[in-house]
Image (cartoon, rainbow, N blue to C red):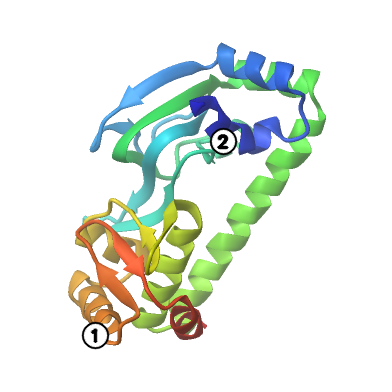
Amino acid sequence: MADDNVLTAPLFVGLDAESSHALIASMKVIDVGRGDVLFHEGEPGDRLYLVRDGKIKLGRRSNDGRENLLAVLGPGEMFGELSLFDPGPRTATATVVADAVVLELGHSDLIRWLGEHPGVAEHLLQALAQRLRRTNEALADLVFSDVPGRVAKALLDLSTRFGQEVEDGIRVAHDLTQEELAQLVGASRETVNKALADFAARGWVRREGRAVVLLDVDRLERRAR
């Protein structure tokens, strides 16, 4: 069932099935296509979203027009919740990468839900702490890791959420353009393509359009360190 994808989100941890499905039933279902924007950086935020199907990217744009891709989210992942706990403008733009279905929950509904299920707040805080940890790791990677190392780490991270085992490895349908993949790594498209070409020449990966097959995970893990 499609709803099974979202039951892994922090909002539902520790809840019984009846309560979980009651919350899902109260959320607004939104169908969106690639390129659609759910909200822009700087806009006021008063709701969170859960990804039921598809992929969403979170990005920020600099004053000179350059874009940094903060994350790519898939089924079961949550975004937009920061503004609920710290009222203020959105810190990123949420754009659809692959046709998606998302569930929307407003601020007042969330507060009422947390009042009825206070234990859920702990899991939401854990999710925020994990996101902060990932952000700190990404900042450290930009300082201490070279581009090929960051590319290897990004591919491995994407594989944990979007990878499917195939006969000769793990196929990762990331649905990102070359430019988006470069934005995720924090490097130029040319440099990222050079790293991917090198990985392919070494037999570590096979490129398939907006997907990549990881052929030698061990080598990629060592390169990512």
Q: What kind of residue is marked 1? A: Ala
Q: Position of residue 17 (x, y in %)?
A: 72, 22
Q: Determine the secondary structure under disc 1.
A: helix
Q: Where, by quadrant of the figure, is residue 62 drawn?
A: bottom left
Q: Identify the residue shown where x is 24% and y is 37%.
A: 34
Q: Is residue 7 above or below residue 174?
A: above
Q: What kind of residue is marked 2? A: Glu
Q: Position of residue 148 (x, y in %)?
A: 35, 81
Q: Is residue 47 visible?
A: no
Chain-order first, disc 2 or disc 1: 2
Q: Identify the residue shown where x is 66% and y is 38%.
A: 10
Q: Identify the residue shown where x is 43% and y is 28%.
A: 102
Q: Position of residue 80 (x, y in %)?
A: 50, 36
Q: Position of residue 175 (x, y in %)?
A: 28, 50
Measure the C-alpha gap from mark 2 to mark 1.
42 Å
Q: Is residue 193 above or below residue 81?
A: below
Q: Is residue 56 visible?
A: yes
Residues marked 2 and 1 touching at CB (< 8 Å) = no
Q: Residue furthest front?
A: 167
Kindly identify which numbered label has been placed on residue 201.
1
User: In the picture provided, is 219 more to the left or to the right than 39?
Assistant: right
User: In the picture provided, is 77 more to the left or to the right than 202?
Assistant: right
Q: Determine the secondary structure under disc 2.
A: loop
Question: Counting other residues with Cα less than 10 Å from the Cα at mark 1, is it few (<14), some (14-19), or many (20 or more)?
Answer: few
Foreground of the two, 179 or 31:
31
Q: Is residue 89 above or below residue 92?
A: above
**Badge count:** 2
Q: Which residue is mark 2?
A: 81
Q: Identify the residue shown where x is 72% and y is 35%.
A: 13
Q: Is residue 31 above or below residue 176?
A: above
Kindly identify which numbered label has been placed on residue 213.
none
Q: Where, by quadrant of the figure, is residue 97 drawn?
A: top left
